[in-house]
Amino acid sequence: MKKVVSIVFLGCLVAIGAWFAFKPYPPAPNVTIEMLQGKSVELASLKNNVVLVEFWATSCVTCVKQMPSTVELYKELSPKGFEVIAVAMSYDPVEFVRHFTESRQLPFIVGLDTNGAVAKAFGDVKLTPTFFLIDKKGRIIKQYLGNYDKADLRQTIEKALAQS
């Protein structure tokens, strides 16, 4: 009897592991993001690129601390098809975002989520920083909350860039 229970338990573990290993990635929401410069970008238009959508705020210490790493990743990997959209939270004053963006010379898209619709579309993001990594097919392949591990993020981005 004990052996049967062990086999059933082992079978359940294998099934659960297989589900996690092969579960489908959810599609990223098709949102239109207002850019700081006044234009807008539709997330779906960036398909065939690997995209990091970062929800951040100028008042978020971790966000400010991580931004140079994000800039470095962008500068290194953008020629290979990597894009970054830094979405400022709805409570962040536009002038604060503009000053931060200009003073740090952020080279990627900086979006404004003035009404919170973009954060809501991504599962009602409330905490910053929150990152979503989207593959070339438009699927969310990884989510990071808080301080990301730079080496892990780079490896995940490079793996996604290598896929067709």
Image (tube, grey):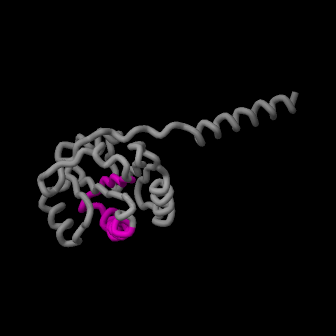
- Residue drawn at (23%, 57%), measured in percent from left and top? 110
- Residue drawn at (28%, 45%), measured in percent from left and top? 45
Q: Which of these two is toward me, 23 or 13?
A: 23
Decide if residue 113 is on the left or right side of residue 55: left
- Residue drawn at (15%, 63%), measured in percent from left and top? 98
- Residue drawn at (37%, 52%), measured in percent from left and top? 49
Q: Write down the quadrant of residue 92 in the picture.
A: bottom left
Q: Which of these two is toward me, 164 or 143?
A: 164
Q: Quadrant of the N terminus?
A: top right
- Residues rendered magenta in the picture: 50-76
* Residue 120 x %, y %: 29, 39
Q: Write down the quadrant of residue 138 in the picture.
A: top left
* Residue 69 x %, y %: 37, 69
Q: Please check the rendered image and state whether residue 141 is part of the magenta-colored stretch, yes or no.
A: no
Residue 130 in view in this figure: no
93 to 137, vertically: above or below: below
79 to 88, vertically: above or below: below
* Residue 31 x %, y %: 26, 41
* Residue 147 x %, y %: 42, 61
